[in-house]
Each structure stands twice: as structure tokens, then as C-alpha cells.
Amino acid sequence: MIPSARLQAAIDILADLDARRRPAAEALKDWGAHHRFAGSGDRAAIAGLVYDGLRRQASAAWLLDAATPRAVMLGTLRLARGLDAEAIARLFDGTPHGPAPLTEAERARLATATLDGAPAWVAGDYPEWLDARLEAAFGDDRIAEMLALAARAPLDLRVNRLRTGRAAAKAALAHLDAAETPWSPDGLRIVVPAEGKSPAVQAEPAFLKGQIEIQDEGSQLAALLTGAKAGEQVLDLCAGGGGKTLALAARMGNRGQVFAFDADSRRLAPIFARLERASTRNVQVRAPRGTQDVLAELAGHMDLVVVDAPCTGTGTWRRNPDAKWRLRPGAIEQRVKEQAELLDQAVRFVKPGGRIAYITCSVLPEENEDQIRRFIAATPGWRAVAPGELAAALAKSAATTANGAAETANGAAATANGAATFAEAVRCSDVGLTMTPLRTGTDGFFLSILTRSD
Ligand SMILES: C[S@@+](CC[C@H](N)C(=O)[O-])C[C@H]1O[C@@H](n2cnc3c(N)ncnc32)[C@H](O)[C@@H]1O
């Protein structure tokens, strides 16, 4: 397909999303099924345009002073792709199957309009109704934070130390330009170009041999910062497909025990193949069985309970930009209720002196700090570990692999905000720490470690 035909396809898909309010992946799949002539390169390029359009939906519409899919695509080419009015006019040239030529008004706005004077939610590209919450979380930094969350995410991998080391995995992926991530001692990063296809990592020999997993660096760090150690008894109460479970088991060097549970057995299903591929031997999967309490005998015996809670996923908007426009206030309320119930449930499994690691991939205070403060106020004997201590501990724990071999902690790497250490980069409150694309170059994650003193 010629570039202008790809643009028209992206505009059509944005119109479909507007009309049917469905996930972008579903609309793209449907489009592909009805346009079989489009090759894989075309589909990847069209998907890239659609996702960039969703990332910059509000600011692109502001720039063109119109909220139509065509206006959003025009604004996106300016804002996300850095094209000037002349370059855009060459794409919108009226060729068959492409969009109609630019109007004079469109050309003028593309040449002169700016985001000066735009409200924060427009400049930062997020729903207007979330502004008060994001202001509470980030204050005046919210535009920069949200713009970083509107950028394209890299592809992060976690090297599985049960199967190989980071240097060897990096060498195996040299043809993909894999580089070390700044903070996680197990992380590799591949930058995905705007127009390019994501590399087929799942077809790589290193993946098939269980040497690497796809996992954002923030998720790797959340698992690492739980402090799970070889020999411990760990319950992963919301294991889902096992992203954190696998990282915990590898970190523990296959020693001790991880019990992986999820209320939804369909979400848990992929974990079996992943555990096998990773050569994990210290994980017991506890799938739900009707009304039976499959975790009963774990009560009071766990060193660590990980609550990787169901959340709004606002921290993953780089990867799911359509989700931000589909989020509704009722969904926040529902997630907050579920999280509170899970935290309360987690308590029964923790042994004296044990801990709970509460994790979300959200940046909203209600799901993070507010949730922890409610828990502490309502649950005598529990307190939050000072987040600064956790962040500072990262360099130390990162320097030692599960099998005791020393590796340089890459704490001196520069990040998006220029911080030299993780403790400087991450945002710490009284009860937890928050990673964000702006601060740590990761997806948005919140972590709080709760300990019981009785
Ligand atoms: C953020 S996801 C977990 C992701 C997973 N830990 C990973 O790293 O891949 C949250 C999970 O919580 C599960 N969940 C929701 N309510 C639950 C409950 N009451 N008990 C256990 N799991 C629950 C959901 O099914 C979902 O899989």
C-alpha cells in the first residue's frame, strides 16, 4: 500500500473506534480480516498510525480545532511524527485510496497552530475528568508525566537467570540491537521504530529456550523490590499469566516455594507453559476450584504475599493508549473496592514478621497511596517500609544475582529525567514508591511493602 492509503486506513479505523468504543486491537484485527491484500508491513504501519493517533488524540484535535478522525491524524503527523505542513500536504495529495487534499484551513493550522494556552488535559493528552486526580498525583508535572505516558514504549525483556546470564542473552539478541536496561539487572531493551514492526521475539531461539521473557522493566523491578529471597515461602495472590511469578521464582534461584493463585483460571492458564519453558521448579500453581479454599493450608505461613492487584492500568497507557479514552470513573471505584478486599485477604496468609508487597500498574492515588493508608489505618500492627529504603536497596540487591554471582548494578545509567540512581529517579511518598515513564523510563508502577510487627 502507498503511504497515503495507509493513512486513509488509519483514519477509517479511528472512525470505527469513535463509533463503536471498542479496543483498538479488535478494530485493527477486523480491518485486517476485511483487507486481505494488506501485507504485514502495511498492517504494522497502520497500527502504528492508529496508536499514535490515540496517544495524541486530544492535542491533535486542539491543533486542528476539530475532533474528527482526519483532524486527529493530521495533528498526530505534526505532533508525534514531527512532519511539517508541506510534508503532510504531500501525503494528503488526493491520490485514489488516500485522503482528500488538505483544505486551506487545515494547511494554515498545520503551519501555525501551537498548543500554547491549551489546558493540561489537552497538552498532556488524557481525559479531562481525570485532571483533578492527576493533579493530586503529580501537581504541575502532570503534563510532562502524561506526555511521557503518551509516548511509544520500548520492548523490554527479562533475562531468565535460571537459564542464562544477561551478557549471553544480549549477545544472542545482538541482531535486534538489544541493550541493557538502566535499573533492572535482568533487563534488556529493544527500541521499536515508529514505522517498523515489533521484532518477533517469541520466535527467537533464546525465547523458545526459556532464556528471555517479555516484561517491562518496571514490572521486573516491582518483583525485585518485593525482596523475595531463596528459601522463602511466597504467595502470589494475583498471579495472572505469571509475569511476576516467573521473575520471583528466578530471583529465588528455584529455592523455597512460590504459590501462584488467581481468581480467574483463564488468566492463570498460560502460566503452565511459561513455567515449563523457564525451567522453574519452585512454583505450585493453585487454580481456583469452585467454592473450595485452595489456599487454606497456607494461612499464617507465608514470608511474603504479593498482591499484584487488579487496577485501572493507567501506568500502561504507553502500550494501550486506547484504554485511557475508554476508562470510566465507575471502573476506578470498582478496582479500589477489589484492591481493598485483596489487601485485607492477604493478611491471613502472612506469618509473624512477614510482609505484603502491594503492586499496581496505576498512577492514580486512589489505587496507590490512599489504598495503603486506608489499610494501615484499619489493620493494627501493620506499617509501610520507608520507600526510600527500598529504592536505595535496589542497587545492593541488583548487584547480587540469585546464585550469588556479582554483577555490576547499573545504578549510574542516565534515564529520561537524568537521574543517576534509582532512588533519585523514583517518586517516594510516605507509604510507597511510584515509577513512571518520565522518571524511570518504565511503565507506571506503584509498590508498597507492608510489614507486620506482632
Ligand atoms: C495485574 S493482574 C496480574 C498480573 C500478573 N501478576 C503478572 O505479573 O503477569 C491482576 C490479576 O488479579 C486477578 N484478580 C482479581 N481479583 C482477584 C481476587 N479476588 N483474587 C485473586 N486474583 C484476583 C485478575 O484475574 C488478574 O489476573
Image (spheres, rainbow, N blue to C red):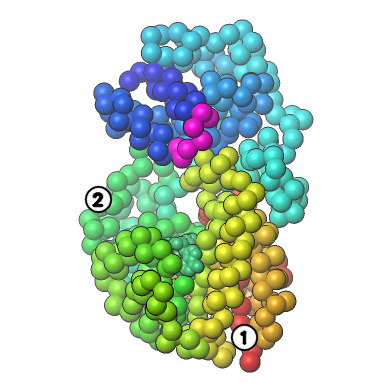
Please identify, in this view, whether the residue under mark 2 or under mark 1 is nearer the observer.
1
Question: In screen coordinates, is 172 left or right of 415?
Answer: left
What is the quadrant of the C terminus in the image?
A: bottom right
Give the residues drawn in magenta, as a range.
17-24
Residue lying at 52% horizontally and 70% vertically, measured from the top left: 307
Disc 2 marks a residue whose amino acid type is Ala
Task: Residue 77: give x, y in percent of width and height.
Answer: 53, 25
Disc 1 marks a residue whose amino acid type is Arg
For marks 2 and 1 on the same chain, the one whose residue lies earlier in the sequence: 2
> Relative to 99, does residue 284 appear above or below in the rendering?
below
On the image, numbered disc 1 is attached to which residue? Answer: 452
> Relative to 191, does residue 269 appear above or below in the rendering?
below
The secondary structure type at the circle numbered 2 is: helix
Residue neighbourhood size for the residue with mark 1, other residues' Cα within 10 Å, grouped as few (<14), some (14–19), many (≥20): some
**Is the magenta region chiefly helix, strand or loop?**
helix
Quick check: is the Cβ at mark 2 less than 8 Å away from ligand 1?
no
What is the quadrant of the N terminus in the image?
A: top left
Task: Residue 100: give x, y in percent of width and height.
Answer: 48, 10
> Relative to 302, does residue 93 appear above or below in the rendering?
above
